[in-house]
Image: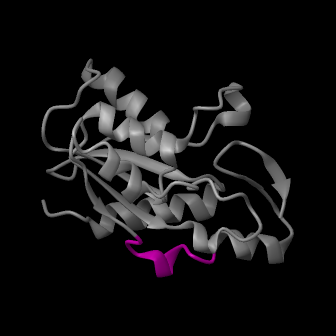
């Protein structure tokens, strides 16, 4: 399989639109989804329970490893924050593919205050991670601003539920 994978990202983006949470998945080079994660910070009272970390934790549990062998990728509907980008390095993931970025976050805080690319660059001596940014961004960039217009509730990356 070649990365990025349109079918997998479209599926994750659809789930975000339907379920109002950032989505992430750990997948193999063959396109097998090992795990999916959503943001559960508020529900779990865990400030590290971001979608990407949750997907990595579940894949690690299922594969019984803390260091992935070659051939595993992280997909996310939003640019991974510094925590999640670092988790990808420490987990030994081959790459990250993300869709949306902080430019389109509306009035929400900038969770990616240090860009994913910058974190991956700083961590390259630990493990080199390939990055595909803004993949299929046109499918998701209106998510946060649309919810503001609709005045609906949404959970942000840090689990804060607010009327947007």
Q: Relative to 153, say whether 7 is above or below.
A: below
Q: Relative to 27, say whether 10 is above or below.
A: below
Q: Is residue 58 left or right of residue 5?
A: right
Look at the image and name its color scheme: one colour
Tell me the quadrant of the picture where the C terminus can be found.
bottom right
Q: Main secondary structure of the magenta part?
A: loop
Q: Residue at x 39, y 34 (%)?
A: 56
Name the foreground residue: 86 vs 22: 86
Tell me the quadrant of the picture where the N terminus can be found.
bottom left
Name the foreground residue: 67 vs 163: 67
Q: Relative to 142, say whether 13 is above or below.
A: above
Instruction: Report which quarter residue 108 is drawn in.
Output: bottom right
The image shows a total of numbered marks equal to: 0
Q: Residue at x 58, y 66 (%)?
A: 102
Instruction: Report which quarter residue 48 is drawn in.
Output: top right
Residue 147 horizontal/vertical position (percent): 76, 70
Q: Residue at x 49, y 45 (%)?
A: 82
Name the foreground residue: 120 vs 106: 120
Residue 136 horizontal/vertical position (percent): 40, 75
Please say whether residue 22 is one of the residues in the magenta stretch: no
Q: Is residue 13 left or right of residue 123?
A: right
Residue 4 horizontal/vertical position (percent): 25, 65
Residue 69 horizontal/vertical position (percent): 15, 32
- View extreme (top): residue: 64
Q: Residue at x 14, y 64 (%)?
A: 2
Please say whether residue 135 is one of the residues in the magenta stretch: yes
Read off the magenta span: 134-142
């Amino acid at each position: 399989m070649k990365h990025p994978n349109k079918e997998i990202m479209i599926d994750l983006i659809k789930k975000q639109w339907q379920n109002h949470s950032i989505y992430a998945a750990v997948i193999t080079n063959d396109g097998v989804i090992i795990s999916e994660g959503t943001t559960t910070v508020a529900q779990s009272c865990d400030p590290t329970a971001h979608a990407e970390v949750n997907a990595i934790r579940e894949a690690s549990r299922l594969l019984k490893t803390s260091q992935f062998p070659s051939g595993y990728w992280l997909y996310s509907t939003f640019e991974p924050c510094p925590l999640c980008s670092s988790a990808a390095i420490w987990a030994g993931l081959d790459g990250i593919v993300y869709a949306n970025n902080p430019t389109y976050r509306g009035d929400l805080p900038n969770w990616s205050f240090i860009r994913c690319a910058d974190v991956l660059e700083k961590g390259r001596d630990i493990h080199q991670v390939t990055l595909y940014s803004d993949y299929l961004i046109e499918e998701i960039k209106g998510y946060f601003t649309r919810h503001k217009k609709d005045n609906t509730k949404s959970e942000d990356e840090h689990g804060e539920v607010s009327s947007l």
